[in-house]
Structure formats: C-alpha cells, structure tokens
Amino acid sequence: MKNMQEIVKEMIKEYNLESSVEIKFIDLISEAGELGKEILKGNNYGKKEFVKTDNLELEIGDVLFSLICIANELNIDLTVAFDKVMEKYNSRFKEKGTIGSEE
C-alpha cells in the first residue's frame, strides 16, 4: 500500500493535479457511482445473473486511486488504516458474530 501511495503522490505532483480534500472526496463519490453503474451493466440492471464487464477492473482502480488521493492529502498511511479496521472487524465478529456496527 505504501508503494501505491507513493506512486500516486508522485503522479499528482508531476502532473500538477493537486486539489483540496473536499474535491478529492467528490471525485471518489463520482468514481464510486461509475463503479456502481458498471456493476449494474454486469447484471443488466438486475435482469440477469452478474457477469464481470470489461471495464469493471478499471472502475475499481479509479475508486482505489481516488481513495489513495484522499489518504495522501490527509497524511494517512493506508496500511495502518487497513490494519486498524481489520482489528475492529475481527473484534466485532468475535463479540457479536457480525462485522456490522448495528446492534
């Protein structure tokens, strides 16, 4: 993850793509919407069983890129964040039998 964060950081710097965290968040939501649309295409909007589309991997990559941009802007190490959330989910599952936060 650190390597991916460094690659994205250098690309943003090289191409002068700096923007505020708010703009980065809006971009993440936009990319998530495009991923959602691609998933819907994969099952013809719920009319058939899901089939992976040609663009699905690229759309997931766009979401990941946008999330990395946010983490970089906020100086968050994604490996640390991932480790913490896995610990949280494992703890919840052991205590409640689910990873969800609802009671």
Image: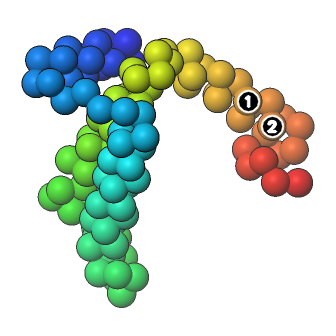
Residue pictured at 29% horizontal, 81% vertical: 44
Which residue is at the front of the view, 45 or 29?
29
Figure check: 1 above or below 51: above
Q: Is residue 34 visible?
A: yes
Residue pictured at 88% horizontal, 54% vertical: 103
Image location of residue 6, percent across then percent down: 29, 13
Which residue is at the front of the view, 6 or 53?
6
Residue pictured at 18% horizontal, 56% vertical: 55
Q: Are marks 1 and 2 in contact (CB under 8 Å)?
A: yes
Image location of residue 39, percent across then percent down: 33, 65
Image location of residue 40, percent across then percent down: 34, 72
Query: Is 6 positioned to the left or the right of 77 in the image?
Result: left
Q: Residue furthest left?
A: 15
Tell me the amino acid under the disc marked 1.
Lys
Q: Residue furthest bottom?
A: 47
Q: Quadrant of residue 90?
A: top right
Gap in Å between the C-alphas at discs 1 and 2? Answer: 6 Å
SS state under label 2: helix
Categorize mark 2 by other alpha carbons within 10 Å: few (<14), some (14-19), many (20+). Answer: some
Image location of residue 87, percent across then percent down: 70, 24
Residue at numbered disc 2: 92
Query: Is 21 positioned to the left or the right of 42 in the image?
Result: right
Locate the N terminus by quadrant. Answer: top left
Query: Is 97 positioned to the left or the right of 5 in the image?
Result: right
Tell me the amino acid under the disc marked 2.
Arg
> Where residue 88 is drawn, which disc sits there?
1
Q: Is residue 57 visible?
A: no
